[in-house]
Structures are given as structure tokens and as C-alpha cells.
Image (spheres, grey):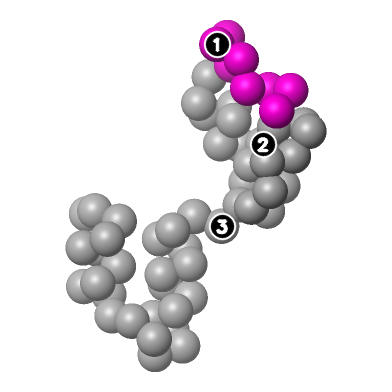
Amino acid sequence: MPYSESLKGLTTKDTGLERLREKALAEGLVLLRQNGIKKMLQGQTTYQEILRVTGD
């Protein structure tokens, strides 16, 4: 995901991580676990591998 100008503007010591996460998701960020599940449904990986990489 590109580091957009709007995300750059939010990146300050006063901005909470949750706010940054919300903005990134709104701009199209796909979480690692979500991407893993998509790949699992396509037969490219297993559920166990997703858990191993992303944590329980």
C-alpha cells in the first residue's frame, strides 16, 4: 500500500495507532491475515500457515 499524503499528515507523535489503522484500512489496506485467508480459499496456503505467520 502506498504511503499517501493523508497518511503522512496523520503520522505525528500525537496520532494514535488506531486512528492510523482506521485511515489505512479506509484507503485500501489489506491485513496480512485477510490476505492469507483469501489465499487459503484459493488453495495457495493452509489455515495452519496463516496462524503460524500472523499469530493466534
Q: Secondary structure at mark 2?
A: helix
* Residue pointed to by mark 1: 13
Q: What is the distance, in whole Å, between disc 2 and disc 1 at their CAs? A: 16 Å
Residue 27 in the figure: left or right of residue 40: right
Disc 2 residue type (three-letter): Lys
Residue 26 visible, this angle: no
Mark 2 vs 1, N-terminal side: 1
Q: What is the distance, in whole Å, between disc 3 and disc 2 at their CAs? A: 12 Å
Q: Is residue 9 magenta?
A: yes
State the mark number for residue 23.
Answer: 2
User: Where does the image place residue 8, in percent across and percent down from the top left?
Assistant: 70, 28
Is 46 above or below relative to 18? below
Q: Is residue 11 magenta?
A: yes
Disc 3 residue type (three-letter): Val
The structure residue drawn at horizontal position 58% and vertical position 9%, both measured from the top left corner, is 14
10 Å crowding of disc 1: few (<14), some (14-19), many (20+): few
Mark 3 vs 2, N-terminal side: 2
Q: Secondary structure at mark 3?
A: loop
State the mark number for residue 30.
Answer: 3
The prevailing secondary structure element of the residues shown in magenta is loop
Mark 1 vs 3, N-terminal side: 1
Please give the range of residues in magenta.
8-15
User: Where does the image place residue 23, in percent across and percent down from the top left?
Assistant: 67, 36
Disc 1 residue type (three-letter): Lys
Q: What is the distance, in whole Å, between disc 1 and disc 3 at their CAs? A: 24 Å
The structure residue drawn at horizontal position 22% and vertical position 54%, both measured from the top left corner, is 56
